[in-house]
Amino acid sequence: MRALSLAVLILLPLCSGCSGRQSALDAAGSEAARIESLFWTFTITVSAVWILVMTGLALAMRRRHEAAEPLPEPLAPDRRVEHRATITINALVIATGVILLALMVASFLAGRSGPSLAREHSLELELTGRQWWWDIRYADKDPARVVTTANEIHLPVGRAVELKLASSDVIHSFWVPNIAGKLDLVPGRQNVLFIKPERVGTYRGQCAEFCGLQHAHMALLVVVEPEQQFEAWYAAELGSAAEPGTPEAKRGKELFSKAACVMCHQIRGSTAGARLGPDLTHVGRRATIAAGTLPMTAVDLDSWIADPQAVKPGVSMPKVDLSPEDRRSIVAYLGSLK
Amino acid sequence: MRKAIASIALLCLLCACEREQRSFEQKAPPEQPVALSVLAPGGEPPNVPPSDKAKKYENNAYSVSEGKKLFSAFNCTGCHANGGGGSGPALIDDHWIYGSAIENIAATIREGRPNGMPSFRDKIPEEQIWELAAFVRSLGALIPKDVASGRSDDMQAAPSENRMIPDPFGLTNTPATTGPPQVPTPAGPAGTQPLGP
Amino acid sequence: MMSITADTRDTGLDDARLHRVLAWTWRTERGLIGALSSVDHKVIGRRYMITALMFLFLGGLAAVAMRLQLARPDSRLIGPDLYNQLFTVHGTNMMFLFAVPVMEAFGAYFVPLMVGTRNIAFPRLNAFSYWIYLSGGLFLWVSFALNIGPDVGWFAYVPLSGPEFGIGKRPDVWAQMITYTEVSALAVAVEIVVTVFKQRAPGMTLSRIPLFVWAMLVTSFVIIFAMPAVMVASTMLILDRLVGTQFFNPAEGGDALLWQHMFWFFGHPEVYIIFLPATGMVSMIVETFARRPMHGYIAVVLSLIAIGFLAFGLWVHHMFAAGIPELGASFFTAASMLIAVPSGVQVFCWIGTLWTGRPVMRVPLLFVLGFFFIFVAGGLTGVMVSSVPLDYQLHDTYFVVAHFHYVLIGGSVFPLIGTIYYWFPKITGRMLSERLGQWHFWLAFLGFNGAFFPMHVLGLLGMPRRVYTYPAGLGWDGINLFVSLSATVLAVSFLLLAVNIVLSLRRGASAGDNPWDAPTLEWATSSPPPPYNFARIPVVRSRDPLWSEARLSREVVQGLRVAVREVVITTLNEARPDLREPSPQPSIWPLLAAIAVGATFLASIFTPWAIVWGSLPVAITLIGWFWPKRVPEDEG
């Protein structure tokens, strides 16, 4: 009974998990799809090999003695049997070699996709890893069309994208399993990753290289949407921050520029222009707070501002002494930044 | 004998705990009143009451390292460079116009000083002001070496190690770990003295 | 009755007298000073084993703590600061303080017995290496207890461990601990190479060496070539942090990836340093319990050597995701897959031996069967992660965590536990309980697979390693809970081992010289072996001396002096008797030297001048150690 419930416990999430929003087994991008089929090729092959070896072992053990006492006399090897065993082992080793060669060729072929995506890409992103969030810049030749945001990427479905990965502090790793494999962000170099999302949806990614205290809370969202929706998002993102409508939000804006917030954050179209923390120009449109740590709701935003260190210990954002009313105003203001 | 070993072990334990502690709960020191002293250079340093927070910040590696991050993040380097000074005074020398105690430095950051040092009251949370002050003290080699943070992974302004004079006995630059705020030597107007010796 | 002088030979002595005299000559003095001065490879080997097992338990506790934290999503049991220290100390401890030393411990204890000599080569160095290892281990754990435990992961990537982001002394502790343990590992490796090459019993040609000894020999060579890389790397890290060099600072012409290359150039062979001795243990247990000599002895030896070489051509597969050029990466894919061939040869030879033998089910063999089940799976997932595209998805996830626990626990710890059951009678003279052993096996086997198999799935579902917590709702919650529960079962199974050891030490069945009727020389002496190992050095005429010879010949070496410590030196290939070589007396100097060296290492993380001032006591203790005693060198 207990075993059964345990089995259910483990199987249930397995079934639901395969179609997860952070799963390597639910490809939504060309690269992930290629790797996923390679994964199944490998898995089926090595499982077969494992079963064969275990069968061999089971057969080898069929003549066993259970706990003989004293142990039987040692056998002197029979030359004919030895000869047969040697031939069998040679054959098995050759088979191993052939299987490995086949897997190697399959792996090599699956790995050769970068060049074609490099030719067709039409969107360029610069990702900078920071302890512990993602600084995102949509590059464009026209400076007026450059978008700066954080922790959430929107991509048009079906278009190849070039990601330029860099780090401003330690090594991070960009990994959105549904879209593509990971690539590290190494200080002092720029790594380039080509991806091509192929299915609309929201996918979660996470830093995959240990980067310090809050490595666990360094997630990002990739929102893959139809071309038009993406263009609309992009256009909105280009604009300056919305002027606050309600008196509460207006008060929040004032407070924001007076308090410590302004030392680190940028809100384009206001006096806040620091580039230390994430850009907040359109923060109200994002789905999460603090690189995927909390969902973007008024309550969570309030508790985040009230004490960031309690939510994400070690994060660079300090606890700022604000009265609950002031905090409410600032939350209202940030929430209005759509 | 056994007692002695135990007490030594306990002592080590305490030092190490404090030095390496990463405390994330921020209980910022109570709001500091605006200092009423005359903020002119020269003469007596401003009389800042000593704070029990001093030890907590300047003997803690994590605070000093956080202060170091903030030092460049808040663009202190714009005037003070990497401690060598520019339009602001140097911080690696032993001239401390407004006192070298962590309380004095914190007050300097909080209230600002004439001739260019702006006030960061309400702009930088109290906690971070203390972290910055602790780091500034490390620039002047005023805190224990094993607490001070290492060099940055940047271009280096200081001469490389092979150009330094060996100091096997640690005779010079002994870190002054404790003691009252030191009396500064009278100096010219802030921001104009040359790079320290 | 003639009196014993320094020149008395064993030729004319009767057995009882010979035993008495040799026991006096090779004794370890009583009392604290005597114990600290011991140079008996068995005494030191036993200390090594006990210390390494202690570290295994401590590391296991760290693992249990981590699993408690990860049992539930968004758990607040352990904060990120402590968690990062926990996994770093767990990994560092298991690799540097448990796995390598425990293998070397068995090597130091059993290689001299298996090749039929009276002590390991350079016995004082052996004592020194133990003291250095102990101080390195204490250094790490005391630091952890003082909240200075390293928190940068067991491979301490720069810049996270570098001067700017590695805060306080924590990464220094890690880097310096490496230096301690590497010094000790290198010392033991040198001793084993020399023991195997020069001190084998007459007649034990290269093609008659027991497979465990071959495995230790190849391992020792891998250690000698791999460990310097990490010592250089950790020294460069210390220099960057404490002296101000720029090896890893890209802004000044250094390179962050340089660290990874240097670390993994050691780090990958490290895996084989842990795994190769285990293959030797498997060969040994398979032989004894299949009741026949190993099938394909030459093939297995060649595989061992091939693995030793190939181990150095794989390191980049830890770095595929760092952005390595495709052509270079493909080379390392090929090399990584290639190493599956010699590993396969060994597996097939073991199965062939079992197939053509009459296997007897005893606890050691049970653990070896568990080894097959787990290690083959781990090896095959290893083939998966060696593929560049697959590695892009699997690297740094729980899939990799599962993979390396499969190869390290399955490939190394299971044979090791089997070997503990196998050799415990030789070390203590008492058998371990077979019943408790079976319980231990089944709990360990089920606990292990329950804890680590689901981790493959976790990795595929996107869970990265080294996260101190994770959000609910990603499909990880149930699996993690199951993993944590299974991990407790695994932990409990190791408690059973401890219980078994304690109980059997008190009232285990008496073992006799050769309880398993095994073929190798360590079983030709009493259990536990006397300080001099063999009253008369046997002469070997085959690979399985106790099976084919005990019943045939009783040839022994004669003419060794009995009142001074002497070992037989034989030629490298044919093992023809060559020299009588004096073996060093017990000495307290290795301990003093180790204290001096350890203190120098420790102080050097606080000031580089420690190296200068520390060299004085180190020099004094080394002079004391090597002070000439006017002992004639050798007399041919």
Image (tube, rainbow, N blue to C red):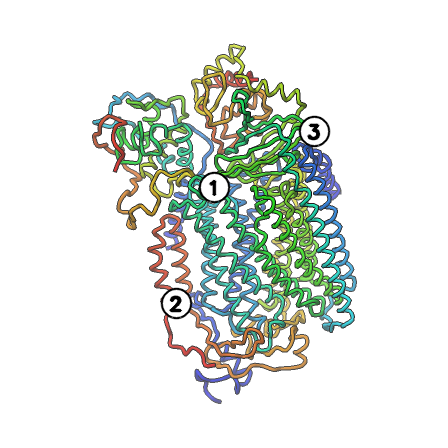
Residue most toward the bottom? Answer: C1
Which quarter of the rendered picture does the N terminus of chain A lie within?
A: top right
* Image depth: mark 3 or mark 2 in front: 3
Please indicate whether residue A263 sits to the left or right of residue C198 in the image: left
- Which amino acid type is shown beneath numbered disc 3? Arg
Whole-percent x and y of residue A308?
50, 28
Q: Are marks 1 and 3 on the same chain?
A: no
From the image, tell me which residue sits under label 3.
A199
- Protein chain holding label 1: C
Is the Cβ of the residue at disc 2 closer than 8 Å to that at disc 1?
Answer: no
Amino acid, disc 2: Trp
Which residue in the structure is indicated by mark 2?
C625
| Contact, mark 3 vs mark 2 (Cβ under 8 Å) | no
Q: Earlier in the sequence, mark 2 or mark 1?
A: 1
Separation (CA) of disc 3 from disc 2? 72 Å
- Taking the image as drawn, is residue A255 in sight? yes
